[in-house]
Image (cartoon, rainbow, N blue to C red):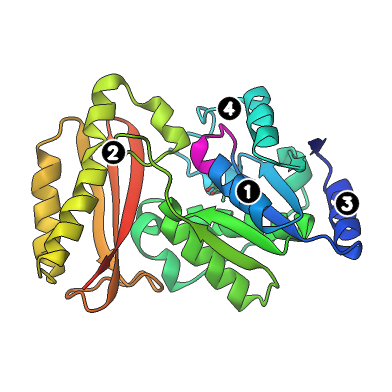
Amino acid sequence: MKKIDSISEMQKISEELRASGKTIAFVPTMGFLHEGHLELMREGKRRTDILIASIFINPIQFGFSEDLDAYPRDMEGDFKKAKNAGTDFIFIPSVKEMYPKTFQTTINLKSITNHLCGLSRPGHFDGVAIVIAKLFNITRPHIAIFGQKDFQQLAIIRCMVKDLNLDIEIIGHQTVREDDGLAMSSRNSYLNSKEQISALCLKKSLDLSIAMVNGGVTETLKIKSAIEKLISTHSFVEIDYITICDPETMEDINIIEGEALLALAVYIGKTRLIDNCLLNA
Ligand code: PAF
């Protein structure tokens, strides 16, 4: 696995690979890799000749009060894991390389960011959109793979790719979970043992909602209040949002007809965790 920190070198390699007829998969990450990231990498390697991954903690997607400095890091461990998962090139630019002093451009997606995490993390998705647009232009992939745990992020990237006519296939990969059901996330490392138990309320809420819909309940208010009740029996948990919405536009819905997205964000102590599932009525 080759490590590359320069944009021009990464672009040159990607162009040469494409010119020689190789197909490229790209998996962007912010590091502190877990099995969820590694599954995305393995999936990329299965689908194409070359796998490029990136590790870049993107400062412009963190709000003022968020955990940029505390964000967990383990570069050496990440290199070993990425290599074992089949990564051919790992792109690890510095902040200065990605955002020189002259940098001015913004990307702002309109209504799709005004829901779910976009409400409690203003500016977050604009920061994600910019870094992903840059990384796509640097790594020149044929396909890019994102986890469905960040469902809104995936929807936003799909929307940006469509709006800007980028010739990249976006693949959503199912959420990878711990044995107890907790969705894998770098932020899980912040949880102490008691908080880990409370965090299981997320998966339990998804299971409860699926059971309710399978049992014929389609009123989203009823499902949301059942989730609130379930979560209230867990310590250290504060709800940020419980939303049932259209999986493409993220607009709230009242009655489930066809496919709907249930998305949750909760604080477990100081740690904000998200999870989601599709509901089908
Ligand atoms: O999901 C993440 O880890 C980040 O938002 C991403 C997609 C790597 C962009 O910085």
The residue that disc 4 covers is: 73
The relative height of residue 264 versus residue 199 in the rendered view (above or below) is: below
Q: Amino acid at mark 1?
A: Pro
Give the foreground label among 3 and 2: 3
Give the foreground label among 4 and 1: 1
Looking at the image, is mark 4 or mark 3 earlier in the sequence?
3
In the image, 82: left or right of 194?
A: right
Which image quarter holds the C terminus?
bottom left
Cα distance in 3D space between marks 1 and 2: 25 Å
Q: Looking at the image, do the residues carrying marks 4 and 1 touch, with CB atoms under 8 Å apart?
A: no
Q: Amino acid at mark 3?
A: Ile
Residue 34 within the segment the image draws in magenta = yes
Q: Dot 1 lies on which element?
A: strand
User: Considering depth in this image, is 99 or 38 the residue closer to the camera?
Assistant: 38
Q: Amino acid at mark 2?
A: Tyr
The residue that disc 1 covers is: 28
Looking at the image, is mark 4 or mark 2 earlier in the sequence?
4
Give the foreground label among 4 and 2: 4
Q: From where the camera sits, is residue 205 visible?
A: yes
The residue that disc 2 covers is: 267
Disc 1 CB within 8 Å of nearest ligand 1 atom: yes
Q: From where the camera sits, is residue 134 visible?
A: no
Which span of residues is magenta-colored? 31-37
Q: Amino acid at mark 4?
A: Arg
Question: Which percent across, then down, holds residue 49?
Answer: 76, 55
Q: Looking at the image, do the residues carrying marks 3 and 2 touch, with CB atoms under 8 Å apart?
A: no
- Residue shown at 59%/40% (left/top)? 30
